[in-house]
Image (cartoon, coloured by chain):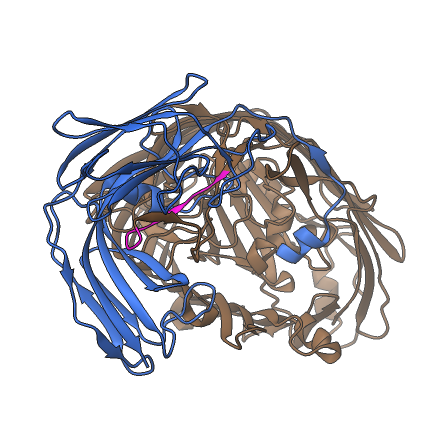
Amino acid sequence: MTALLLGGCMHLEDPAPSQETRLVVHAVLNTRADQQYVLLYRARTGVPNAVEGGDLSADEPVSGAQVTITGPDSTASGGGSSVNPFGECCEPGMYGLFRPLALSVTGTGTYTLRVQTPSGEEVTGTTTIPGPAIFTRGPDRIFFRLSDTLRLTWPRVLGAASYEVIIRLPQSGERYRTFADTALTIAGTALTIAGDEIFLRDQDMSVVVSAVDVNYYDYYRSQSDPFAGAAPSHLVGAVGVFGSIIPIYATQLLVR
Amino acid sequence: MPAAGQRPTQPDTMKKADSLARRPVSLPAMHTDTTRIERRLFESRPNVSALSVTGRELRSAPRFFAEADVLRSLQLMPGVEARNDYSAGMNVRGGEADQNLILLDGYPVYNPFHFGGLFGTFIDPAVGRVDMLTGGFPAPFGGRLSSVLNVRSAEDDRSGIHGTTEVSFIASTLSLGGALGTGGSWLLAGRRTYADQAINLVKKNAFPYHFFDLEGHVAHTLPFGFRFSATAYGGDDLLHFNSTSEGERQHVLWGNRVLGGTLSRAFTGVPALLGDSVVAEQRVSQSLFDLNTQISGGGFSLMSKVRDARVGGGLTAYGPNQTRSIGYEVAGQRLSYSVNYPVPLFPTDSFRQRVRSVSAYADELWTPTPSLMLEAGVRYDAIAGAHSAAIMPRLSMKYFLNKDLAVTAAVGEYGQWIRSLAREDIPLRAVDYWIGSDSLTPMARARHYIVGVERWLTPSRSLRVEGFYKRYNQLLEPNPFDDPQRRGDEFLPVKGWSTGGDLMLRQFESGRFGGWIAYTYTLNSRVDSEGNRFFPSQDRRHDVNLVGSWHLPKYTLAARFNLATGTPFTRIVGQFDRIRYDPITGAFTSQTQLPELQFLAGPRNGERLPLSQRLDVSVTHDWRPGGLTITPYLSVMNLYNAHNVFGYVFDYGDAPPKRIALPQLPIFPTLGLSVSW
């Protein structure tokens, strides 16, 4: 049927009118990170981009915004600086808040995000960091992909909406990412949705389990489609996420 | 004695025949004028919103992709809407697509579709008759909110073996049947597509898909006045292929199995209180649906199963002015759905359920005066585990203004406790993923109000006009963002109503021409869980179908023209990239395995697709050498290649953004051959 749909495509391509711009915020507080980032972009709505897209997205980065995160003790941290992931100035649309100078995210509590763009738009959101939680590093171990099965269990963390498990290569990034409750079992021969092996032979792969808050969980667990719209956001004035994550377990697998 | 509706053209010849002992004799010609079943129903029941169509009439419409298809043909009836060319499913009088109870000889079929909804599962020559109730159905029917469709197997009780074989561009079909003893019949039918085999000759595994259907039906009279009938059906869709890059096996398999039997007996000499006769009937059936999808060697796995077992029965007492019936049904379903990874468009949840229901009904058809007919009934449905039980009254009436003209009305309460996780807003509906009511998802409820006028203009032409209003008090719609770790959020509450009217002017085949004009107007409104009012995706305002077949001495011409206003859709107003966070590096990353494009949706169903139109035609030639009837045919779908729009895709990657129209089916000519004996 897909073939029929595509094969019968007609010359029915028309320009569509541009729509009102929408701000997109990605901000995740991580208790184990030295710096916290807030990404601020404009969704692609047909309005020509004033700025070329950043490294992470083809959306239009928004520079010059005032980004403030207020902690549970009412101390506000933030500024208008834009940095790249290495702390170097200036990656368009990326706002970094460094610990301990700018923001100290230490554990449980509710944090508030406030963004003001140069054109006067305002975005707000809150996140409550799950916890307290102890981070555990498991021992490195040899994992025979043809015979072994990865079995993980972890204790519940107060306030966690779910737990995200990421399996990744140290250099080239993640292989597999999923949410689970308090246990996960993956066969060594399991494949990703693209049909790739999750566990790559002769590679050292890290496995990380993190507790996440409801904002993070709702935003990242859902798949967007043209009939449902974007994943649920708990932000006011933008779409996207202001959530929190606490890594609680990590281990290294020497895949054979 | 001549049967009812038959009259001799000469005085009675029985005495003359007796006196001629064993010598051959030529009897005078008889003119047979059997009353049509539609006319008999008109005279004998309120019959509100009921359609009865023979297999022959359904086959008279032009074929769809070379296949005569019951479900496609029903889309040409009043009150029945098709979302698009790619769907054999239907929305009845504004109802959602999962609100139709589809039965094969009274036994449920859960996903009667092939090829992602493009074809129906019913084998055309095996269909004897189709009865459809588009609303206001009486107490014996329950479990769905909008309609009941009962496909009855053909019963050919001629002696010898008779059959039909068809060869088309898509599939081959063989149907065999004949008499079984005295007053019985048997039927065996099968169909298989063979595009996979044909294309395989040119390029191996280029089209590794086929589907098949097998159906058997027997009806037989047993000793002591018992009558037994049984139906078995099995059909599968099979898609097997290897990934060209990785070599993994991929497959998508789904199919239905139905096995059911009915035992009945008529009793006479019953107490006068019951009337002059009583018919007792007992049914038992099992229906299965199984979907198994394994993509990327299991990287993506999707499974859906339905196991339905039910027993039911009833007693119907016939009297001169009253027909009373009572009945019951006990059903159990095992439902499961699982998906191992979230992907767009498919439900992300996994669950297993057992649903048990007990139903009972009482129904009385009463003719207090020759002009008035009343049918009153009540149905009780109780769902174990859902703590849901409902008493649902039904009432319908017919008042004859004269022998050919009657006004009708019906009102009734309806409940549904099995529903689909497939979202109505998605215009392609490959299969339904069924889930039942439990303590977290209540029974959906609706109330129907119907008024109408039915008139027989001539003995072979009728006109029916009906208006309807349906109120949905407890409707549920699938939640596109449900949480797989949480039970109970799979559906969101919706309420609303559907109203409108439909008309059918029908010329039954009596001479050269047969056909109908069907027009449907619907207006639908729904209110979602956040209080937002919207037009549901099936809200097609105007839909007209002109269907006709002309029987010439050697040829039969058939045509179907459809004109329909557009259905609503949600405009995409923008898109953005979802950016993943890496807790190890403490930074955002674009290195992910998942599609991260996010769509910004405008007001729900705030825009409409343009008007669509389609003309299908066919010509068949009947050739009768010996005892055979050989019928080659040419069928052309969308004769003038109307550019109808299936839907829009928006691309905001460029400035200005683009709107790309996806087409409905283009012109498609096909040839085929049918041989019957």
Q: Looking at the picture, tell me which residue is in the foreground, B141 or A27.
A: A27
The magenta segment is B576-585
Whether residue B583 is in magenta: the answer is: yes
Q: Quadrant of residue B625?
A: bottom right
- Residue extending farthest top: A120
Nearer the observer, B32 or A99: A99
Q: Position of residue A224 (x, y in %)?
A: 44, 43
Q: Position of residue B26 (x, y in %)?
A: 81, 66
Left or right: residue B147 versus residue B242 is left
Residue nearest the viewer, comparing A25 with B69 = A25
**Residue at the extreme front:** A88
Residue at the image point whose x is 38% and y is 69% from the top:
A198
- Number of disc labels: 0
Chain shown brown: that is B
Give the x, y percent position of residue B454: 60, 29
Q: Residue at x 61, y 66 (%)?
A: B156
Q: Is residue B570 visible?
A: no
| Residue B412 % position (x, y) | 38, 31
Q: Is residue A184 above or below residue B535?
A: below
Quarter occupied by the C terminus of chain B: bottom right
Classify B664 as above or below B495.
Answer: below
Quadrant containing the N terminus of chain B is: bottom right
Q: Nearer the viewer, residue B139 or B39?
A: B139
Q: Colour of chain A?
A: blue
Which residue is outermost to the right? B553
Q: Is residue B41 visible?
A: yes
Q: Quadrant of residue A240?
A: top left
Reply above or below: B451 against B647. Answer: above
Image quadrant assignment for residue B446? top left
